[in-house]
Image (cartoon, rainbow, N blue to C red):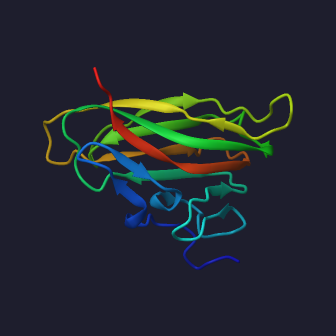
């Protein structure tokens, strides 16, 4: 059923700070465009470990933000994704991981390739990563990141989002 407010806003309780530099985002810890419309997304029940399911969208925008500023250093963002059997539109759409430091920061991006099929028609697990440097030169060192495919207008579906982590990169 559709809602008057179609976009899902992240539940801050689903963003877990493991220490001053490490974060875990559960599926309900993301802002999801069209996330409250069940024609497009199936969100897990509160308090469960189930993934969010992208049913079908032509505008993929799933974003997360750390609650606090990060200390200076290099960080790795890792999503845990599953491509379901019968997924469509994912392998031929330019899906990007993007991130910036601070609201006024400049986005850095990395194109990711999702595999829709494998030889035995099982679910495919993907864990794309992306690294970004945080400089200690600004008051706002929150990390803003996400998955995006908003340019083609092509329909895509069959993607499960289990969550994401933000961890410091050790030299």
> Which sits in the foreground, 91 or 67?
67
Question: How many marks can you see?
Answer: 0
Observer-nearest of 170 and 71: 170
Q: Quadrant of residue 108?
A: top left
> Which residue is at the far right?
120
- Residue depicted at 61% across the width and 59% down the height: 50
Where does the image place residue 102, in percent across and percent down from the top left?
A: 26, 46
Q: For this view, does 103 lie left or right of residue 54?
A: left
Instruction: Specify the quadrant of the image occupied by residue 82.
Output: top right
Where's the N terminus, which quadrant?
bottom right
In the image, 90 versus 117, the foreground residue is 117
Question: Is residue 8 or residue 25 the one in the foreground?
Answer: 25
Quadrant location of the C terminus?
top left
> x and y percent of residue 2 in the render?
67, 76
Residue furthest top in the image: 171
Q: How far across and how far down the image is residue 87, in percent?
A: 78, 44
Left or right? Give the position of 75 relative to 9: left
Q: Is residue 121 above or below residue 52?
A: above
**In the image, is 3 to the left or to the right of 123?**
left
Q: Does residue 50 appear left or right of residue 76 in this picture?
A: right
Query: Could you tell me residue 37's position as x and y percent?
Result: 65, 69
Looking at the image, residue 7 lies above or below residue 100: below
Q: Residue at x 72, y 66 (%)?
A: 39
Residue 93 sits in quarter: top right
Residue at (52% x, 44% y) in the render:
147
């Amino acid at each position: 059923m559709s809602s008057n407010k179609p976009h899902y806003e992240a539940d801050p309780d689903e963003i877990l700070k493991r220490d001053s530099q490490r974060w875990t985002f559960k599926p309900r810890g993301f802002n999801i465009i069209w996330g409250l419309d069940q024609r497009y997304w199936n969100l897990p029940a509160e308090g469960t470990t189930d993934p969010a399911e992208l049913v079908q969208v032509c505008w993929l925008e799933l974003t997360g933000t750390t609650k606090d500023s990060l200390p200076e250093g290099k960080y790795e963002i890792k999503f845990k994704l599953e491509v379901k059997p019968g997924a469509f539109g994912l392998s031929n759409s330019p899906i990007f991981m993007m991130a910036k430091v601070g609201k006024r920061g400049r986005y850095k991006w990395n194109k990711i390739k999702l595999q829709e099929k494998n030889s035995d028609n099982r679910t495919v697990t993907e864990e794309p990563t992306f690294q970004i440097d945080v400089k200690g030169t600004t008051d706002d060192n929150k990390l803003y990141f996400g998955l995006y495919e908003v340019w083609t207008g092509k329909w895509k579906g069959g993607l499960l989002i289990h969550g994401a982590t933000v961890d410091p990169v050790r030299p």
